[in-house]
């Protein structure tokens, strides 16, 4: 019991520090919308690196990723692969997003795309905005629920689920409300360092304590359960499913609005590229977490877990003989992963809610800046509250909503690439590709069987791109300039 | 207005294409074994860890190449 008190005290203390850092970031900040949403387009290398790291490494890093290694084995490495390959796509696209955002004052993803492909009454912007929020709220809910679950497990139930998730959600909402992207930046830096240090410490300690080292651990898995160490793994994930999951995640990653919109915040294009150079190294954070999952293959052989996502918690809290303060630190590190992602999701969703949905119509665009800023702040609180309530209610359809909505967002990629790089890109072709690609993805996700076991989103992208290219080529006349070039000359 | 054609050189695009192929079918097929265990990791896992580093090096090279050509931002 006294252990639980110590763990709780440490974690609450940690949350206090995060809150303090987040609130202090407000100082010296101009109170403009651009400042609140995009850090005044002035974010530097260090902070931006940790923001992008925090966005991608969510509660999944400490729960789902070890769970994959524990239940499936080798295919779990797909996460490392896609995070690394995603950087290639960022490298090609992000500098343009950043430059055009500065030039035209864009703050959201929908604004960018609807400027490249203008529609009557900005219908495209509204649709993208609504689907984005539908994808991000379930994602945020999962982070908040993950925080609640971590709290409950690490304190042996002393902090119940509802209170743990409320604490995490409340702290995030408070500093995002007060400090916007600056608050997110400095807290993500703190949380990112926590995550890296704690992940490595836990991974190496686990291997050392139970097996005498990482090499010894894998030797033992090799003799007891070698199927976990190569493809197709223990769950039988084929090369088709594995490869297309890597490709679609690497390609689609850039289309997550909270990632896309961070490109606007960079100080310069060179800064962005420096962030991207370092970025692949961030995926090494997953290696120790996967090691813990692999440890579970041997350690939990006789008592398999119902829910693989609990493998890290089970090993660290129950099996390993760790002092309470280490568990307190471990909990803080895992909370850092969940909360740093949550902050970005709440911030981005609120921006989209106000700018793309409430203000979607061109006549609503000229709200005074302070009014738009206040509404965005209220949006942060409203969205955090909604996600908290959803976490308590835990509707079963949440993951389906996330997969479905995100599946559609990924289908915006071909038209984005067309807008940036292709003079013959036709608007009609882009819309047909987007629509058919989305329908194919949703059908394969929720009903049909994909050919060769391919990822549904990948099949959608193939059909989408083929239609976009073919119809653009057939349509005559479109073309001496790419959509982005037309945009630039019309200013 | 700077031009939009600022892509990495052909050599580097090939380099990144190889990185991609190494991590998916069919490139990753050749790494699908347990031995040798390197740095404590089974070969299949080590393969990915190593390619992350190869990517990192490639990005540094691209950045330096571009830095010599483009001076129009910042």
Image (spheres, coloured by chain):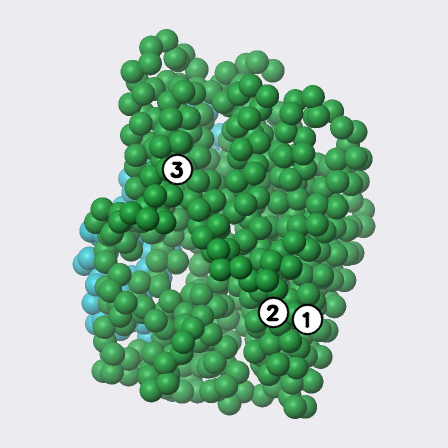
Chain colours: A green, B cyan
Residue at which label 2 appears: A148
**Left-right relation of A176 to B58:** right
User: Quadrant location of residue A424?
Assistant: top left
Percent x, y of residue A369: 77, 32
Mark 1 on the same chain as mark 3: yes
Q: CA distance from mark 2 to mark 3?
A: 33 Å
For the residues bearing labels 1 and 2, Cβ distance under 8 angstroms: yes
Q: CA distance from mark 1 to mark 3?
A: 38 Å
User: Quadrant location of residue A281?
Assistant: bottom left
Q: Tell me if residue A332 comes above or below residue A455 in the rendering.
A: below
Residue at which label 1 appears: A163
**Left-right relation of A385 to B51:** right
Query: Residue at position x 64%, y 76% from top?
Result: A160
For the residues bearing labels 1 and 3, Cβ distance under 8 angstroms: no
Residue at which label 3 appears: A438
* Image disc number at residue A376: none
Q: Tell me if residue A441 comes above or below residue A178 in the rendering.
A: above
**Left-right relation of A48 to A35:** left
Residue nearest the observer in this picture, B62 or A491: A491
Badge 3 crowding class, 10 Å Cα cut-off, few under 14, some 14 to 19, many 20 or more, is many
User: Quadrant location of residue A9?
Assistant: bottom right
């Amino acid at each position: 019991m006294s252990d639980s008190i110590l763990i709780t005290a440490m974690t609450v203390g940690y949350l206090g520090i995060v809150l303090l850092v987040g609130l202090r970031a407000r100082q010296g900040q101009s109170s403009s919308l651009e400042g609140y949403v995009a850090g005044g387009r002035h974010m530097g290398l260090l902070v931006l690196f940790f923001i992008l790291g925090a966005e991608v490494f969510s509660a999944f890093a400490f729960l789902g990723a070890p769970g994959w290694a524990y239940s499936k084995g080798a295919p779990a490495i797909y996460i490392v692969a896609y995070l690394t390959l995603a950087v290639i796509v960022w490298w090609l696209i992000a500098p343009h997003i950043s430059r055009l955002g500065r030039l035209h004052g864009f703050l959201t993803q929908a604004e960018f795309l609807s400027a490249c492909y203008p529609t009557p009454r900005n219908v495209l912007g509204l649709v993208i905005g609504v689907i984005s929020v539908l994808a991000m709220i379930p994602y945020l809910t999962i982070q908040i629920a993950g925080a609640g679950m971590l709290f409950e497990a690490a304190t042996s139930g002393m902090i119940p689920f509802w209170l743990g998730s409320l604490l995490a959600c409340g702290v995030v909402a408070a500093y995002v409300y007060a400090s916007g992207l600056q608050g997110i930046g400095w807290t993500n830096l703190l949380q990112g360092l926590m995550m890296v240090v704690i992940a490595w410490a836990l991974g190496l300690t686990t291997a050392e304590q139970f097996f005498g080292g990482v090499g010894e651990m894998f030797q033992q898995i090799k003799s007891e359960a070698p199927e976990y160490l190569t493809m197709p793994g223990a769950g039988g994930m084929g090369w088709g499913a594995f490869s297309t999951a890597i490709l679609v995640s690497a390609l689609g990653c850039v289309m997550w609005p909270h990632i896309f919109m961070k490109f606007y915040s960079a100080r310069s294009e060179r800064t962005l590229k420096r962030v991207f150079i370092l970025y692949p190294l961030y995926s090494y954070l997953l290696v120790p977490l996967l090691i813990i999952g692999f440890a579970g293959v041997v350690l939990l052989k006789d008592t398999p877990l119902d829910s693989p996502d609990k493998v890290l918690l089970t090993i660290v809290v129950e099996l390993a003989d760790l002092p309470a303060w280490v568990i307190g630190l471990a909990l803080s590190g895992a909370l850092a992963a969940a909360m740093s992602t949550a902050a970005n999701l709440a911030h981005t969703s609120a921006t989209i809610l106000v700018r793309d949905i409430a203000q979607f119509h061109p006549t609503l665009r000229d709200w005074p800046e302070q009014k738009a800023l206040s509404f965005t702040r209220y949006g942060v609180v409203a969205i955090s509250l909604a996600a908290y309530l959803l976490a308590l209610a835990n509707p079963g359809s949440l993951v389906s909503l996330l997969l479905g909505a995100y599946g559609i967002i990924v289908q915006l990629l071909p038209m984005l690439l067309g807008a940036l790089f292709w003079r013959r890109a036709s608007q009609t072709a882009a819309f047909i590709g987007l629509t058919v690609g989305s329908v194919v993805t949703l059908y394969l996700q929720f009903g049909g069987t994909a050919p060769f076991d391919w990822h549904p989103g990948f099949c959608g992208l193939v059909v989408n791109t083929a239609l976009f290219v073919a119809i653009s080529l057939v349509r005559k006349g479109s073309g001496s300039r790419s959509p982005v070039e037309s945009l630039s000359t019309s200013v | 207005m700077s031009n939009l054609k600022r892509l990495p050189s052909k050599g580097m695009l090939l380099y990144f294409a190889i990185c991609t192929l190494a991590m998916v079918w069919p490139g990753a097929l050749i790494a699908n074994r347990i031995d040798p265990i390197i740095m404590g990791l089974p070969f299949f896992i080590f393969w990915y860890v190593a390619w992350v580093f190869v990517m990192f090096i490639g990005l540094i090279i691209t950045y330096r190449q571009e830095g010599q050509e483009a001076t129009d931002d910042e």
